[in-house]
Every structure is written in structure tokens, then in C-alpha cells.
Amino acid sequence: MGSFSAWHWLIVVALIMILFGRGRISALLGDIGKGIGGFRKEVRELTDGQAASRKVSRRAAITPSPSHDSTESAGGNDR
């Protein structure tokens, strides 16, 4: 079992070009490129959305909630 030589690869490429033609190969590669671009866009949107939700949760954790003193809210004046 040897590795393929340059002639073997040339024959394989020639057969692929004959079977599929230049137009079909370029269209296929264009579709693959569009798919990769769409995938990257979705991943970027997901990571941006996760980063934004982390910022919101951090702000909520840092922001103190209004506290009420239990003696003031009881409403009793001791006069």
C-alpha cells in the first residue's frame, strides 16, 4: 500500500471535473461558504446574547433592593 503520487491526484481531479463540471463545483463551494457564514453569524448572536444576559444578571445582583425597617412600617408612634 503506497501513497498516491501526483499522477493519481491529477487523474482524480480530472475525473471529478468531468463528472461534475466547473459550474456545479463552484456552486457547491459557494453554498458551503454561505452555510459556514450563516453558522458563524448564529454562533456570534448566541454568544452576544449570553454576554448580554450575564451583564443583566450581574447588574441585578449588584443593585441593592429597597429595604424597609420593620419598626417604621409597623406604624406605631409611642407618644
Image (spheres, grey):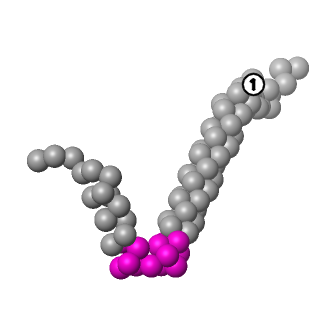
Residue 25 appears left or right of 8? right
Camera-nearest residue between 69 and 62: 62
Camera-nearest residue between 16 and 29: 16
Q: In this view, does 65 lie above or below 34?
A: above
The image quarter containing residue 65 is top right
Q: Is residue 74 visible?
A: no
Q: Where is residue 56 in the image (x, y as percent from the top left)?
A: 69, 40
Near mark 1 (Cα within 10 A), the count class, few <14, some 14-19 or many ≥20, is: few
Q: Position of residue 20 (x, y in %)?
A: 40, 78
Give amino acid for label 1.
Asp
State which quarter of the image contains the C terminus: top right
Q: Is the magenta stretch mostly helix, strand or loop?
A: helix
Residue 45 appears left or right of 26? right
Q: Where is residue 43 in the image (x, y as percent from the top left)?
A: 56, 52
Q: Where is residue 2 in the image (x, y as percent from the top left)?
A: 16, 46
Count up the numbered dots: 1
Residue at the front extreme, as displayed: 7
Q: Is residue 59 above or below residue 48?
A: above
Q: Can residue 49 be seen in this view?
A: yes
Residue on which the image places disc 1: 69
Q: Is residue 75 magenta?
A: no
Residue 59 appears left or right of 77? left
The image quarter containing residue 74 is top right
Magenta-colored span? 16-28
Residue drawn 36% across the image and 79% down it: 19
Residue drawn 31% across the image and 65% down it: 11
Mark 1: secondary structure: loop
Camera-nearest residue between 78 and 58: 58
Residue at the top extreme, as displayed: 79
Residue drawn 68% across the image and 37% down it: 55
Camera-nearest residue between 62 and 46: 46
